[in-house]
Every structure is written in structure tokens, then in C-alpha cells.
């Protein structure tokens, strides 16, 4: 009897330890405050704002591209020789994992939009095998890009040299990947240079995908 009771306890413990836990819905209060605009730090709920930029095909890509979808976002520039090539390679690997899932999309915002023109982004997309139907590389107004990085995705602190306003002295260089659900809510942050974090990101995308398919 004792053995049966012990076995039952082990089985129950195993079930709860292996059962997928829901991902947190991250508010600005749960993000490192140094990354959050002071005006938003006490906000209890948050959604990524709408946007409209130019993509690698020279078309407008706006927030309708990810509306009702799960998406992963990062910030990069094409001439980066340090973390960006690693991140783009990792993003490509994650995208390949979900290439047949219409619920999952990817966004890469250029932090040097003045140099990352449409032809430059097009060449970069070709080099990394970026599928246009699922993954957009975006350029546009620098201040708008930096605004969405700071007040929507919470990916970096203000620059050391200035106000963090997207001016010429302002600069983003972050290894963060941001996971956003189909309701535009942030669900996780990941080191875009880390294999273990990419495994965690893939797992978390699957969790969100199951949430999206769950009947009401």
C-alpha cells in the first residue's frame, strides 16, 4: 500500500512538473525598469503599438501583417559584424521551424534605416533566406523605429549621450528577441545569440500556438 501511494505521488508530481505552464503576459511593471520609458513604468497592461514601415520589397508593411498572429521581433542593422549576423542566423533557424505555421510571423527593424535602404535589405534577405510571406525586414523613419523599440517592445535604455529620442547620437544595439502574442501582448524576451534561449523561444511559440487554437 505504501509503495502504491508513493508511486501515485511520484506520478502526480511528474504530471505537474512536465505540464506546460502558461506564459506570463508581461506588463511594463514586469520588465527591467531601465528599459521602460518612465511614463509607462507603472502601467499594468500593455500592447505593442501599431506601425507602418517599408519592407525589403519596397512595400508598406504595417501592423496588419501581424494582426491576430504570434510574432517575434528584433532590432538589427545590415553592416553589424558582431551580434547581428548571429541573431539573423538564429532567427532564420526559428523561422524554419515554423515555416508551415500561418499563425507565426517575424519582424526585423533596422536601427540604421538611413543606410539600410530597400536594395540593401533585399540583399540581406537573400543572404539569410528570408521568406517574404512570413518575415519582413523593415526600414523607415529613424525616430519612429526608435520610438517603437522603447515604448512598445521595451528593448533598450536611453542612449548614454542623449535623450534616447532616435536622433543621430542615439543608437540601438540589443540582442533581444521579443515574443508577442496574437493580441499584441509581450509574452517573453530571449537572447538572440543563445541556443538554449532559441530552444526556449521555440517551445514558447508552440505554447502560444496551442493557446490560439484552444476553443473558447
Image: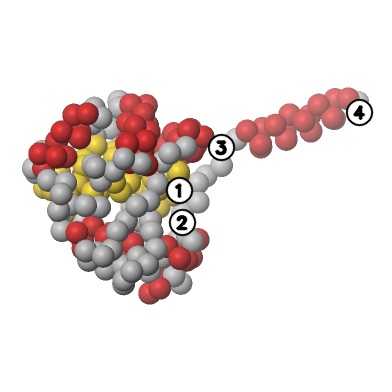
Residue 164 in sight here:
yes
- Say which residue label 3 marks: 20
Whichever of labels 2 and 4 marks the residue nearer the N terminus, that label is 4
Residue at mark 3 to residue at mark 4: CA–CA distance: 29 Å
Of the numbered discs in the image, which one, if any, rests on residue 160?
none
CB of mark 1 within 8 Å of CB of mark 3?
Answer: no
- Kindly state the secondary structure of the residue where label 1 is placed: strand
- Say which residue label 4 marks: 2
- Say which residue label 2 marks: 26
- Say which residue label 1 marks: 188
CB of mark 1 within 8 Å of CB of mark 2?
Answer: yes
Residue 53 in sight here:
no
Mark 2 vs mark 4, foreground winner is 2
Mark 2 residue crowding within 10 angstroms, few (<14) / some (14–19) / many (20+): some
Residue at mark 2 to residue at mark 4: CA–CA distance: 44 Å
> Image check: 51 left or right of 13?
left
Amino acid at each position: 500500500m505504501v509503495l502504491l501511494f508513493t508511486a501515485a505521488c511520484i506520478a502526480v508530481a511528474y504530471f505537474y512538473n512536465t505540464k506546460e505552464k502558461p506564459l506570463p503576459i508581461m506588463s511594463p511593471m514586469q520588465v527591467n525598469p531601465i528599459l521602460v520609458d518612465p511614463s509607462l513604468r507603472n502601467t499594468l497592461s500593455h500592447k505593442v503599438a501599431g506601425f507602418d514601415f517599408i519592407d525589403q520589397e519596397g512595400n508598406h508593411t504595417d501592423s496588419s501583417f501581424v494582426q491576430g498572429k504570434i510574432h517575434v521581433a528584433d532590432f538589427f542593422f545590415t553592416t553589424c559584424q558582431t551580434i547581428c549576423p548571429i541573431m539573423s542566423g538564429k532567427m532564420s533557424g526559428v523561422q524554419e521551424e515554423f515555416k508551415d505555421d500561418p499563425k507565426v510571423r517575424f519582424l526585423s527593424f533596422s536601427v540604421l534605416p538611413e543606410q539600410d535602404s530597400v536594395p540593401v535589405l533585399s540583399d540581406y534577405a537573400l543572404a539569410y533566406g528570408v521568406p517574404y510571406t512570413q518575415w519582413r525586414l523593415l526600414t523607415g523613419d529613424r525616430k519612429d523605429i526608435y520610438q517603437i523599440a522603447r515604448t512598445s517592445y521595451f528593448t533598450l535604455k536611453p542612449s548614454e549621450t542623449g535623450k534616447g529620442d532616435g536622433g543621430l547620437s542615439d543608437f540601438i544595439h540589443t540582442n533581444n528577441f521579443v515574443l508577442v502574442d496574437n493580441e499584441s501582448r509581450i509574452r517573453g524576451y530571449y537572447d538572440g545569440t543563445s541556443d538554449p534561449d532559441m530552444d526556449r523561444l521555440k517551445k514558447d511559440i508552440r505554447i502560444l500556438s496551442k493557446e490560439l487554437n484552444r476553443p473558447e
